[in-house]
Amino acid sequence: MKSFYTPDDIKALNPSVDLGLPGEYPYTRGIHKTMYRGRLWTMRQFSGFGTPRETNQRYKFLLSRGQTGLSVAFDMPTLMGLDADHPKCLGEVGHCGVNVSHLKDMEILFDGIPMKTVSTSMTINSPAPMVWAMYMATAEKQGAKLSELRGTLQNDILKEYIAQKEFIYPPEPSLKLVVDTIEFAAKHLPEWNPVSVSGYHIREAGSTAAQELAFTLADGFAYVEASLQRGMEVDLFAPRLSFFFDCHNNFFEEIAKFRAARRIWARHMREKYKAKNERSWWLRFHTQTAGCTLTSQQPENNIVRVAYQAMAAVFGGTQSLHTNSLDETLGLPTERAVQIALRTQQVLAHETKVPLVADPLGGSYYVEALTNQMEEEAEDYFKRIREEGGVIEAIKNGFFQREISKAAYQHQKAVDAKEEIIVGVNEFIDSADKPPDILEIHPEFEEEQRKTIAEVRRTRDSKSAMNSLEAIRSAAKKEENVMPAILEATKAYVTLGEMVDALKEVYGEYREPVVF
């Protein structure tokens, strides 16, 4: 970074070509002309803990406090496709999110919540088809049509191999499952985003902003190419692809990252993939403030960090925003902490006047130079990924993992040497610091889930359940779209683990190679 920037730093920039106006190609300045004057971003709070009944109460609390969309956090057993009564799940049920093992759990989770009108985001990846099917079946029981449902399925399996590591099957069949969901959504759920291509977890694993940008968009292009290979028309599915980014502490760098992301996506979709629909060129994204920047030391400081990160996300033109709670380094957030996080967004939206102007930093020598730099670094990474043989091969040979680990190591070295100051951690330390009260997950929640799953297995039609499992295996073996079979199995109260295991019989399980 230079100490100041001048017109010389952006002399190669062509404003009419590289910037345009808000709502105009290449959307560097935002995908809508009026941006937040026309509609504020959706305010979501990522939430889930214990049993579906407990989380249902939290959702109703948040909606009553002004939240405008739900975002479901699942526990580790659910994320790994395991039922609550699996031996591996002992002590884990409901601890980092809500446990959902079958359709009855989903019915309880959304009891009294109008799924026809509420937009829901679900952070689930490997078992995404099964959990999504539970959501659809529950909505239909409420009287909603699939075509009316609005929301987002994270369903970004490629970043699991790159960063988060919650994978089940090998990359190739996992990518096929993602395309199955994209195809099913295009036919039956026109208002649903079947994939949220997620840079968030890449950044949380230790990447730089430029790596987050490049690796996320590379994954997005991989989903586009796989869908085209399926024979789908690009403009039938691309308008419903969405993105999910982290927002870190480097205020201006984050804004530049979001602006560069829109420009890169628009150009590639129009010029490389020949999309004709303007909505296919739009990069729509959700932002979550950076969990990895929160500290257990002096946790009240996290409120300040989150507020600055949220403002950067809004300056960058996000469509949806989650603000982390001050106590999330210690446990799942308490109601008090969640309300402060939500109020942070509401103050930003209604008191700062920031939303009144689209892309207020557009034309800044510094921000435009950073945006160009981000784009150049991303394009360089795209070239390197192609040289590795594409995203799947780069995953298998450890390219992404090595790049992220090097970046994380360099950051930690800088913190240890106090070249990077973390307030309350390596400077401005308070020895009298006391942790706040945290949310306790009671052991009886796990026992309750075990009893519920036993009751579901006892009362369901066993023949229908077994037949529907065989239909899933058959569709997978024939390389058909498995979503219709999974939806029928869900309605027969086949459990999450049973459906996941049926596909394991066909696809096998993935073991990540050791990367040095």
Image (cartoon, rainbow, N blue to C red):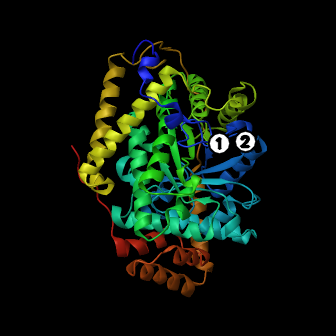
User: Element under label 1?
Assistant: loop
Placement of 61 over or under 249, stated as above or below:
below
In which quadrant is the N terminus drawn?
top left
| Residue 326 appears anywhere in the view | no
Observer-nearest residue: 8 or 245? 8
Q: Earlier in the sequence, mark 1 or mark 2?
A: 1
Q: Amino acid at mark 1?
A: His
User: Label 2 belongs to which residue?
Assistant: 39
User: Label 1 belongs to which residue?
Assistant: 32
User: Element under label 2?
Assistant: loop
| Horizontal and vertical percent position of residue 331 | 54, 38
On the picture, is 427 further left or further right than 98?
left
Q: Amino acid at mark 2?
A: Arg
Q: How many marks?
A: 2
| Residue in the picture at 38% in, 80% down | 477
On the picture, is 92 further left or further right than 407?
right
In which quadrant is the C terminus drawn?
top left
On the picture, is 64 further left or further right than 169?
right
